[in-house]
Image (spheres, rainbow, N blue to C red):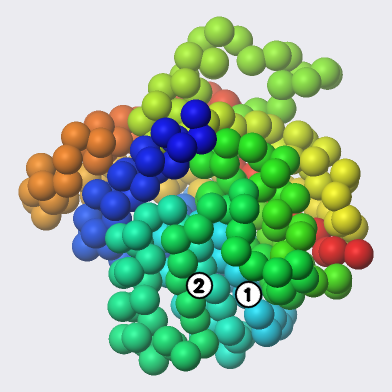
Amino acid sequence: MTSTLYRQIQQFYDSSSSLWEQIWGEHMHHGYYGPNGDLKKDRRQAQIDLIEELLSWAGVQQADRILDVGCGIGGSTLYLAEKFNASAWGITLSPVQAARAKERALAAGLSARTDFQVADALNMPFADASFDFVWALESGEHMPDKEKFMQECDRVLKPGGTFLMVTWCHRPATPPNAPLTPDEQKHLEEIYRVYCLPYVISLPEYEAIARNLSFQNIRTADWSKAVAPFWDIVIDSAFDLRAIFGLLCSGWGTIQAALSLGLMKQGYERGLIRFGLLCANKQ
């Protein structure tokens, strides 16, 4: 199952990343539209604002060695490396993304301080206690073993370092909350199929995993309202002539994802999809 999933993820991002960059730029993640999601912003600025708001929320003011788990084409990796004058590593399953991230690092004059690799986040090619900041922005949803993913992030983090994870979740579904309904399960399964996800879990479940690791000062937050407008803007951008032409050239997987953007919009509207944050320090 894992090898098939990884191949699907790789193919999805190999085929779609260049189109996303052409239309949206280097940041392959949600934007931040204010705590209540009611601020009007340039879409790329909203993505940068999300990074800054996350760093502020987590209290990250400095980092020397950064790992970006699920780095895409290096948008966050390069931003963090420049902001903190740090060395940064990024890992992705997509060779196309890793190659493009290296090109972008060269263009930005950051090649000497950054490295991008094709690697499995469940078995990372780094020694224990290698980084003082581990950043995972919208990659946890792709992980076929959430516990192993967080164990690996814990393993490579230095004592005293900070772990910051942001991921797609479903609503809390354990008592006192109602379990997921068959209709909600069906909605999630459609999202899994389109976006190459094995499954998602709730934010309280991520917190429970974190509490069984060597983390302390664990904090969580739900920023669903702050990012939900992102999907309206993505849907609008899909009707751009460049996007339509690019979709036709990108293959069925990318076309299918574009045609299914409403699944995420509806998921937020019904309270099923949640945008979960978790930060912690390693003991």
**Labelled disc at residue 66:** 1
For this view, does 162 lie left or right of residue 18? right
Residue 77: image tag: 2
Q: Amino acid at mark 2?
A: Thr
Of the 4 image quadrants, the one containing the C terminus is bottom right
Q: CA distance from mark 1 to mark 2?
A: 8 Å
- Give the tally of numbered discs: 2
In front here: 215 or 128?
Answer: 128
Q: Is residue 191 above or below residue 238?
A: above
Do the residues under discs 1 and 2 have CB atoms within 8 angstroms?
yes
- Between discs 1 and 2, the one toward the N terminus: 1
Q: Residue furthest top?
A: 182
Quarter-of-image position of residue 126: bottom right
Q: What residue appears at the point 41 percent right and 22 percent down from the top-left corner?
A: 190
Q: Position of residue 141 (x, y in %)?
A: 55, 41
Q: Residue at x 30, y 36 (%)?
A: 257
Residue 83: quarter of image? bottom right
Residue 93 in sight: yes
Q: Which mark is residue 4?
A: none
